[in-house]
Amino acid sequence: MPEVTLIDRGRVRADTAYVIDGYSMASAENPNPDHERIDFVVWNAVVETDAGTFLWDTGCPTDAAEYWPDPLYGAFEAYDAEEHPLEGDLADSGYELDDIDAVVMSHLHLDHAGQLGAFEGRDVPIYVHEEELKFAYYSAKTDDGSIAYLASDFDRDLNWEIVHRNTHTIADGFELHHLSGHTPGVLGARIETDDGTLLIAGDEAYVDANYADEVPLGPGLLWSERAWRDSLYTLKELERVHDADVLHGHDLERFEELAAKY
């Protein structure tokens, strides 16, 4: 069965209202609510299977403070990114870059695709959903779409492996699921391990409130609320059927809990 190693790739500090819709909304009783900035985890995973060793996402760039557009870095402060080079964090977990047989990109936002350049020209398959790759290029190459895509992250000599359907079995016990909502092409996964079933929600659920309380992400992080809600119910059905642990996209407490288990 697959084995999963969860890797802590640092922190992004942001206003909670970005990820929980209405979190600090004013009212007649509270016309000037306090805003709370908290730390969100950035993580990757290494999934070892009979078909090879897969890396899930690549994290923030080490030079995020200079590289990201000022408005984005101001909102999502990746303050320790320089301490988390991909090769160094892999090494701390017992892996080298050459151990990675393929990469799965949950999506191509700048905090997930920031170190894809490590695989440029290496012929390592990079799995991405068809809808995600299209929207990423549309966003990065035009004035429309989302500002969270940077062409220099992914417009490279990469060996794209396109996922076209809603489910895709990548290896025995490792199944990808299309979870559109946060972006058109978010991928999650169901991974069967000796420690139980791990369900990767990714940024479909940034934090537990998005999942447990069914509160959408803030409008700036939501491509389609209708698609997001459909994907949420898909995840909850998978959790019920497989009695799975659910790993969210950036929830620090949930990450630390599951990193101790898997």
Image (cartoon, rainbow, N blue to C red):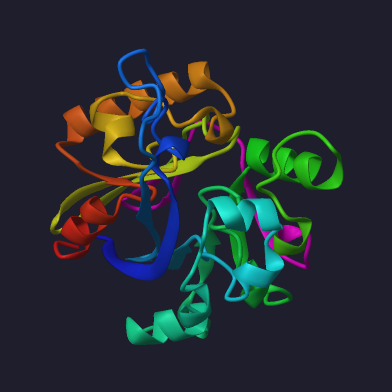
Q: Nearer the viewer, residue 99 or 45?
A: 45
Q: From the viewer's perspective, is 17 left or right of 60?
A: left
Q: Residue at x 73, y 55 (%)?
A: 150
Which quarter of the rendered picture does the N terminus lie within?
bottom left
Which quarter of the rendered picture does the C terminus lie within?
bottom left
Q: Is residue 171 placed above or below 259 in the rendered structure?
A: above
Q: Is residue 165 placed above or below 74 in the rendered structure?
A: above
Q: Position of residue 69 (x, y in %)?
A: 71, 57
Residue 160 colored magenta?
A: yes
Direction top: furthest residue: 28
Q: Is residue 140 visible?
A: yes
Q: Residue at x 62, y 75 (%)?
A: 63
Q: Is residue 96 visible?
A: no
Badge count: 0
Q: From the viewer's perspective, is 160 left or right of 180?
A: right
The image quadrant of residue 113 is bottom right
Residue 112 colored magenta?
A: no
Q: Nearer the viewer, residue 104 or 39?
A: 39
Q: Is residue 30 placed above or below 113 in the rendered structure?
A: above
Q: Nearer the viewer, residue 114 or 10?
A: 10
Q: Position of residue 187 (x, y in %)?
A: 49, 42
Q: Residue at x 66, y 51 (%)?
A: 71
Q: Nearer the viewer, residue 30 or 190?
A: 30
Q: Position of residue 54 (x, y in %)?
A: 44, 65
Q: Is residue 234 placed above or below 87 in the rendered structure?
A: above
Q: Position of residue 141 (x, y in %)?
A: 85, 46
Read off the magenta span: 154-175
